[in-house]
Amino acid sequence: MSISTFKKGVHPPYNKQLSQSKQIATIDQPEEITIPLQQHIGAPLKPVVEKGEEVKRGQLLADTDSFVAAPVHASLAGKVTAIEKVPSPQGGRVLAIKIDPAEEQKNDFFAASEKEPEDIAPDKIRQAVRKAGIVGMGGAMFPTHVKLSVPEDKEIDTLIINGAECEPYLTIDHRLMLEKSEKIVTGLRFLMRATGAERGIIGIEDNKPDAIKALKSATANFTDITVEITETKYPQGGEKMLIKALLDREVPVGGLPLDVGIVVNNVATAIAVAAAVNEGKPLIDRGLTITGEGINNPGNYQVPIGTPVAKIIEAAGGFTGEPGKVILGGPMMGQAQASIDVPVIKGTSGVLVLPKDKLESYSPAPCINCARCVDICPMSLVPTRLEKMAQKENLDLLEEFQVMNCIECGSCSYICPAQRPLVHYIRIGKAAVTARNKSEQGG
Ligand code: SF4
Ligand code: SF4
């Protein structure tokens, strides 16, 4: 049994034992749901419903004519009580539609097809994915139909399903692979059909042997799909790392996986694609992990999009004591929240609660030039120099040192003995370079 990986990376404590054996459960219906209109990378949406309107579960709430965007839908039937700006889990305030859920839940899904993937036109699959508002559910929230629209001058030979789940603490993808393995395979077959990929690979880290077994069994009848095992190492689930590990191909600087003939999708995204095509179901709920030493009953839950994070914390038995940090996502790439009243969005893979008494406060010390950050950077960058360039706002040098190739994995900050917030400054540097280039192009 061969185990593949990429060069460099780190081994943080994984802490997955808190929730990995907990079956995916549901929660009681929330008293209110809040659907932000910006749950994707791309153009803003416009509401197509009004305050006071009764909506069904799955009904379209907001859309746009722009190609790079993903519409949002009502995750529960009920009455629209407000269309207003709310705090976003991604920071800042965004326009959102609030719904008071009804007792009786009626669905409004679109036309479905029970056909086998080879009997459906690729364009029909892409249309269903667009209509369902599916985005990358691993956290990136890039519209999936855009990923599946392969330019004429490119050819996709392989569709990869990312089952690495390399972020510490998170276990929802692991549970989905165990509990919904057939749906993942169905979704993968639709994705292969939509892109023309002749081969499908499901990549899973070797710390999930039961998931590997379940997917091997679910793919046994498909000669064009294999399950490949990767080393448990962070950030193995980064698209570029997974492609390197599984196929030994390198995505060019500033390029995309499709430049090397590959499209990568997360396991939850594959399930959403299967539900869109087979059931006409929009992306209105998602699985997530709630975990950390600061929560009483860590576990995995399937919740409607728009559920307040506070409601999930309550379902998981509440805080063990005074919470120090509530992070949406994992500890490496997740975002700390100022409030637990923010809603779950399409990219929310987890809620991590760290208790106050376990948090260490620290202040960064000067760099000791140990080069550890350089030794582990999976993109072979020089984080210590990028940090200094970002602080000095030297945008030309930042570009020359390929700051845009940073995947913001946080490995450099994690390994730094001087506890320097390297990724924080690198992010600022990337944003400054992007803004400058956009203004130079007149955008
Ligand atoms: S520089 Fe970027 S890619 Fe490299 S370790 Fe730091 S965050 Fe990760
Ligand atoms: S790991 Fe920290 S201390 Fe070492 S070179 Fe990088 S920034 Fe400096």
Image (tube, rainbow, N blue to C red):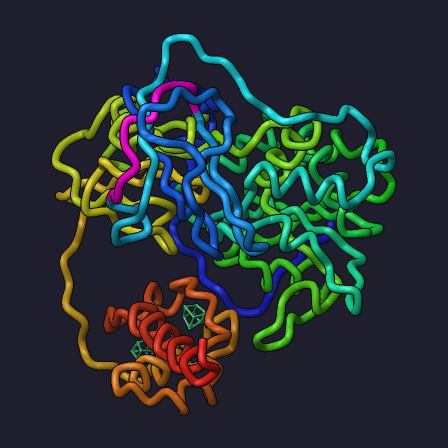
Q: What residue is shown at x 68% (from left), y 56% (from top)? A: 263
Q: Which residues are magenta?
A: 76-86
Q: Position of residue 362 (x, y in %)?
A: 15, 63
- The residue lying at 66 percent from left, 71 percent from top is 250
| Drawn side of residue 37 relative to residue 244, left or right | left
Q: Going 47% across and 20% down the picture, which residue do you hit?
A: 56
Q: How far from the left and from the top, in percent, is residue 33?
A: 33, 28
Residue 414, relative to residue 73: is it above or below?
below
- Residue 114, image x and y in percent? 77, 24
Q: Main secondary structure of the magenta part?
A: strand
Q: Is residue 84 magenta?
A: yes
The front one of 364 and 122 is 122
Residue at the image position 29 percent from the left and 24 percent from the top: 32
Task: Locate the C terminus by quadrant.
Answer: bottom left
Q: Nearer the viewer, residue 246 or 426?
A: 426
Ligand 1 lies in quarter: bottom left
Q: Position of residue 371 (x, y in %)?
A: 38, 81
Q: Is residue 269 above or below residue 317?
A: below
